[in-house]
């Protein structure tokens, strides 16, 4: 008890786990950022997304993604196993409900990567989620990264660039904007970690009882 | 132009200077935190407060505070030279308008230290200010720190502890709560720097034109 007995809830608030959503247009480097966050060895619980897109070199099943066949994915939707899902450039992506349940039970900050459509869904499901919009430095940089993957045709590329433009229209529902410039991934990761640290100290006026 | 031409204002937003206000009850370590922030050599512009309170050992005129006589202080009020001022435990403290003007022209993040009364005034004058409430670990810690200064009588001490309790009632107008625990000043400073970094990336929905 004592001096801080009244606002104890506020003092303890910083320890509450956050739901951190890394989002942004295709090609901005969501996967790279997550890889780097994992490498830092911090106590985050990373949610694994299910996808029908082909596995890229170096990706590990059950760690980077759950790689599933289209029919399997449709079954997951049918059974209500996905908390959100979207068709992104002909590939299905979805967040397994079981993954989020495990994450919540971990009492650690939960980090998930979703496309911009998915972020809108998460915002509706969990208004308190921390939504981070990742961006490349400029269009040329984004185009270069998409080409580097060699998984896209030129028509695909144009579609993705157009979509990226439109996706900026949803910035309003995000909390933070982080630049993931070429060769500055560490800087972007540092910023994301600062944001998470800061949010643990944020005062939520709705939760302060006077 | 190109992809990011539309939301350019948003991308540039992170570089806008912040007005960072370090506040909290007497004895939580506002001065210590500021000293440590200065030592980090980061490009902040620190606002110097005018005060009638006696100079403590090691404090430098014009750097830590402007130490003025009571009549001088009252003259400053009379001439409208203070942006805010308050009588805190028989000592006047005030923020010189000229200081804030210089700070704003510096195009750097502005850091100022004010008591909780002052923070309320700043919030009214500059709603976009970033208000950080500093707290000690518990009442015993706060009492120990106040006693250490040896500038307070026991009656003064009790008054300050009571006031600290009341000041928690104003948490709602603050943005962040930072614990400045004994022997963990560096941790508190790290948190404050993370908050400042994060705020530079915050999306202000009012400023996002769609």
Image: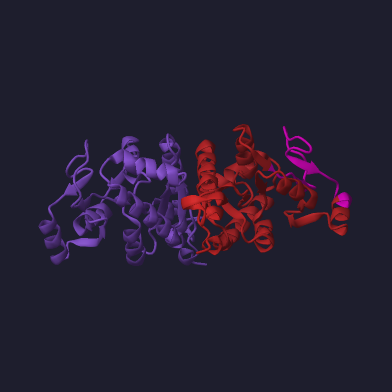
Chain colours: A purple, B red
**Where are the magenta residues, as a range?**
B46-72
Q: Front-most of B76 and B182?
A: B76
User: Percent x, y for residue B61?
Assistant: 79, 37
Q: Is residue A42 magenta?
A: no
User: Percent x, y for residue B54?
Assistant: 78, 42
Q: Front-most of A194 and A181?
A: A181
**What's the residue at 19%, 40% (across, down)?**
A60
Q: Front-most of A42 and A119?
A: A119
User: Percent x, y for residue A10?
Assistant: 46, 58
Q: Is residue B172 left or right of residue A146?
A: right
**What's the residue at 31%, 54% (across, down)?**
A114
Q: Is residue B49 magenta?
A: yes
Q: Is residue A40 left or right of residue B145?
A: left
- Asked if one can make out residue A108 in the rendered structure from this viewpoint, the answer is no
Quarter occupied by residue B121? bottom right
Quarter occupied by residue B141? top right
Q: Is residue B101 above or below residue B41?
A: below
User: Percent x, y for residue A200?
Assistant: 44, 51
């Amino acid at each position: 008890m004592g001096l801080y007995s009244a606002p104890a809830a506020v003092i303890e608030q910083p320890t509450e786990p956050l739901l951190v959503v890394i989002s942004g247009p295709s090609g901005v480097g969501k996967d790279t950022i997550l890889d780097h966050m994992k490498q830092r060895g911090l106590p985050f619980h990373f949610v694994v997304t299910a996808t029908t897109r082909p596995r890229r070199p170096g990706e590990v099943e059950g760690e980077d993604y759950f790689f599933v066949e289209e029919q399997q994915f449709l079954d997951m939707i049918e059974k209500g196993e996905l908390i959100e899902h979207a068709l992104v450039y002909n590939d299905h992506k979805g967040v397994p409900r079981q993954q989020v349940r495990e994450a919540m039970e971990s009492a650690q900050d939960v980090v998930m990567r979703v496309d911009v459509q998915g972020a809108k869904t998460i915002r509706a499901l969990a208004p308190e989620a921390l939504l981070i919009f990742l961006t490349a430095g400029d269009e040329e940089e984004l185009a270069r990264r998409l080409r580097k993957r060699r998984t896209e045709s030129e028509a695909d590329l144009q579609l993705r660039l157009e979509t990226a433009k439109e996706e900026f229209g949803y910035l309003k529902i995000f909390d933070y904007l982080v630049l993931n410039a070429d060769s500055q991934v560490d800087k972007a990761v540092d910023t994301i970690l600062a944001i998470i640290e800061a949010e643990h100290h944020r005062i939520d006026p709705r939760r302060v009882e006077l």
